[in-house]
Image (spheres, rainbow, N blue to C red):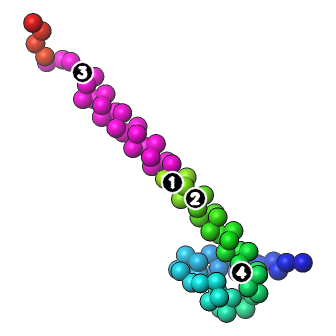
Amino acid sequence: MPDTLTPSEVEEIRRLVHLGFSQPQIVRRTGRSSATIYRYVKQIKQEQRRHYAAIRQQRNSGVREESNQDNEQSYGDSEGYETC
């Protein structure tokens, strides 16, 4: 049966990953098996990738909306122009 970590241990591993610690360093620091640390680090990194992908997608959609609004403001109003 695989090791189960306490919530505080998971948060410690998350913090160490964020700080750039390697998996062997985390193993030594926590005293847990390398298989357990590997499994949790893999899960943490997958969560980070999904999180950052969602942020990128949100930012990209926001940029497109802003650029569309700029175009509407630039071309949408013809007041002030003289007609021939």
What residue is disc 2 on? Answer: 51
What residue is disc 4 on? Answer: 37
- The CA distance from mark 4 to mark 3 is 60 Å
The structure residue drawn at horizontal position 65% and vertical position 69%, both measured from the top left corner, is 44
- The residue closer to the viewer here, 81 or 49, is 49
Circles 1 and 3, Cβ within 8 Å, touching? The answer is no
- The CA distance from mark 4 to mark 1 is 27 Å
Q: State the quadrant of the N terminus.
A: bottom right
What residue is disc 1 on? Answer: 55
- The CA distance from mark 2 to mark 4 is 21 Å
Q: Position of residue 2 (x, y in %)?
A: 85, 78
The structure residue drawn at horizontal position 64% and vertical position 63%, both measured from the top left corner, is 47
Residue 4, image quadrant? bottom right
- Mark 3: give few (<14), some (14-19) or many (20+) Cα within 10 Å: few
Residue 83, image quadrant? top left
- The CA distance from mark 2 to mark 1 is 6 Å
Q: Position of residue 45 (x, y in %)?
A: 62, 68
The structure residue drawn at horizontal position 53% and vertical position 59%, both measured from the top left corner, is 52
Residue 22, image quadrant? bottom right
Circles 2 and 1, Cβ within 8 Å, touching? The answer is yes
At label 2, which amino acid type do we have? His
The answer to if 32 sits in the magenta stretch is: no
At label 4, which amino acid type do we have? Ile
The answer to if 69 sits in the magenta stretch is: yes
At label 1, which amino acid type do we have? Ile
